[in-house]
Image (cartoon, grey):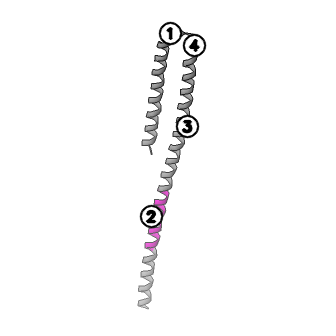
Amino acid sequence: MEMEREIEARINTMLDLLLKMMDEKIKRMDEEAEQWNRIEEARRRLSNLSSLKSTANFGISKMEVNQVEEKNEESPTIVAQLQLEVKKLEKGVESTLRRNYLSL
């Protein structure tokens, strides 16, 4: 009878350890899944920002062409101003990308 109790206690101890190990594994898998979700969200944001940047660059290029055609004598000033605006937009996109990357 004593031997049966000892065996039962050992089995229960092993089962408890196995359950604890399984719980830890599930927690790690949940954490990994959450990290993948964050990575996918960052990729989606990057893609959106990239599209926005392309759209902004196209719009600025189109504006630049239109304004240069309309005011040929002022074109160097307008082009310089637009180039500054493009640089500001690029810096804004880059800082947003950095923030999104660092928030992972």
The label number, if any, that marks residue 50 in the structure image = none
For marks 2 and 1, the one nearer the N-term is 2
Coordinates of residue 75 in the picture (x, y in percent):
50, 12
Task: Specify the farthest residue to the top.
Answer: 73
Badge 4 crowding class, 10 Å Cα cut-off, few under 14, some 14 to 19, many 20 or more, is few
Quadrant in the rendering for residue 13? bottom left
Badge 1 crowding class, 10 Å Cα cut-off, few under 14, some 14 to 19, many 20 or more, is few
Q: Quadrant of the N terminus?
A: bottom left
Whole-Å distance between the Cαs marked 2 and 1? Answer: 68 Å
Coordinates of residue 80 in the picture (x, y in percent):
46, 17
- Please give the range of residues in magenta: 16-31
Task: Specify the farthest residue to the bottom.
Answer: 1
For marks 1 and 4, the one nearer the N-term is 4
Marks 4,3: beta carbons within 8 A: no
* Kind of residue indicated by mark 1: Glu
Whole-Å distance between the Cαs marked 1 and 4? Answer: 10 Å
Q: Which residue is mark 2?
A: 24
* Kind of residue indicated by mark 3: Asn
Marks 1,4: beta carbons within 8 A: no
Whole-Å distance between the Cαs marked 2 and 3? Answer: 36 Å
Q: Which residue is mark 1?
A: 74
For marks 4 and 2, the one nearer the N-term is 2
Mark toward the viewer: 2 or 1? 1
Whole-Å distance between the Cαs marked 4 and 3? Answer: 31 Å
The label number, if any, that marks residue 69 in the structure image = 4
